[in-house]
Amino acid sequence: MTSAAALPEITVERAPHSRWVATDWSTVPFGSLYSDHMLVAEYRDGCWREAAVRPYGPLPLPPSISALHYGLSIFEGFKAHRAPSGEILLFRPSENARRLRRSAARFVMPEVPEALFLDGVNALVSMDEKWVPDHGAGALYIRPVLFSTDTSIRPKPGERFLFVVFTCPFASYYPAALDVLVTSRYVRAFPGGTGDIKPGGNYAPTFLADVEARARDCQTVLWLDGPEHRYLEECGAMNVFLVLGDRVVTPELSGTFLAGVTRDSVITLLRSMGHTVEERRVAIEEVLAAQKEGRLRECFGTGTAATISNVRRIHVDGEDLVLPPFGPAAVGPLVRERLVGIMSGRDPDPHGWVKRVTRDARR
Ligand SMILES: Cc1ncc(COP(=O)(O)O)c(C=O)c1O
């Protein structure tokens, strides 16, 4: 569904008091404190209407809305960093705007036009500029969500929607090293399903698997494909990479898992660093065999919140596959440094990935 017509002007209502506090963001759990403002835009009668940056707070909504009953809700996640110069940099926000449009198409929702997405985020982040942690001390996580506010409980595509964006500062998400469980008891996605987009409903069914992972001293699940329970797909809510001998291997995009922006960036950086990266199917048996032959050098997950998270143990069929500790030439930490250098404005941006936040004249 596309949205024709002119876009609404983004109005601004400033919060009377700021809740910002000077703090060490590494001590604040991810998603526990939100910045002062949010963007709210409304879609009704076939077009985007009011759009406003206004104080972060509750949205008065009736209990019959179809987002609650039928899961008509999709979201995105990306980050803003503070450069050494003090400027605020968004990392590849157009990619998230594009992915939100793909999610919307699958759920018969209206597209959020790229201009509304980018201008709205710029207005919001520039308004809450002080919430972006200092250079090197974390990032501002940006959470756009689009959901239906239709009040009919008839199961059908929605007609009225809210596009809301809010933000939270943070420094870390996953712990420094991850232990992951391989299970065939649950699947995250299957061909023809919604594994390659971001509806909220993809996440709730994974929580029980995570609970079971924790019972085995793991933090999350290394997901296998739905039909065969054989091929690696994702690592928690991250894409997964392996270093097998002198090659870096990552599952090829199959339509059943998310095409991560971090995944794409890491592949580009690794190739520019001279690594051979193979995008192909990787069976769990291949990982076990590589471990026996001493060729399994690294496993890491990639995603916006964690950037790159090192896997140190894979629990599979009652056995622990323990990965060797990172040496000085380990691929994961080196590519992480490259990526963080670009995201945070510390290093040049040869791929044109960062977008500067411009000051909103109305502030
Ligand atoms: C299920 C899943 N896989 C992978 C990713 C990584 O995607 P990205 O690098 O765009 O954050 C995410 C995070 O959005 C995710 O939720």
Image (cartoon, rainbow, N blue to C red):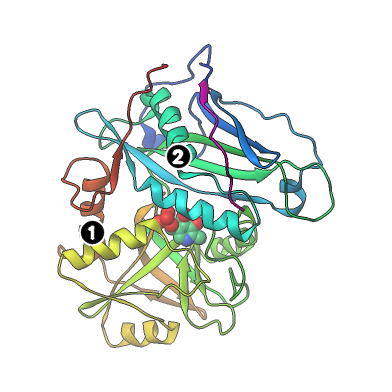
- Nearest the camera: 214 or 248? 248
Q: Amino acid at mark 2?
A: Ala
Q: Sequence order check: which comes first, mark 2 or mark 1?
A: 2
Task: Tell me which segment is drawn in magenta.
Answer: 1-11
The residue labelled by disc 1 is: 335
Q: Amino acid at mark 1?
A: Val
Based on the picture, tell me whether residue 9 belongs to the magenta stretch.
Answer: yes
Where residue 273 appears, as percent x and y from the top left, is 16, 64
Determine whether 203 is above or below 51 in the image: below
Instruction: Report whether residue 267 is seen.
Output: yes
Q: Is residue 307 left or right of residue 49?
A: left
Marks 2 and 1 close (CB-CB < 8 Å): no
Kindly report the distance in space between the C-alpha atoms of the residues bearing marks 2 and 1. 31 Å
Give residue 245's quadrant in the image. bottom left
Please give the label number shown on residue 225. none
Determine whether 225 is above or below 14 in the image: below
Where residue 204 appears, as percent x and y from the top left, is 64, 56
Numbered disc total: 2
- Nearest the camera: 54 or 241? 54
The residue labelled by disc 2 is: 115
Give the prevailing secondary structure in the magenta stretch. Answer: loop
Based on the picture, tell me whether residue 305 belongs to the magenta stretch.
Answer: no
Instruction: Report whether residue 30 is seen.
Output: no
- Say which residue appears at 40% left-offset and 60% top-offset: 178
Q: Is residue 135 left or right of residue 28?
A: left
Q: Quadrant of ligand 1?
A: bottom left
Give residue 214's quadrant in the image. bottom right
| Labels 2, 1: front one | 2
Secondary element at image label 2? helix
- Nearest the camera: 60 or 235? 60
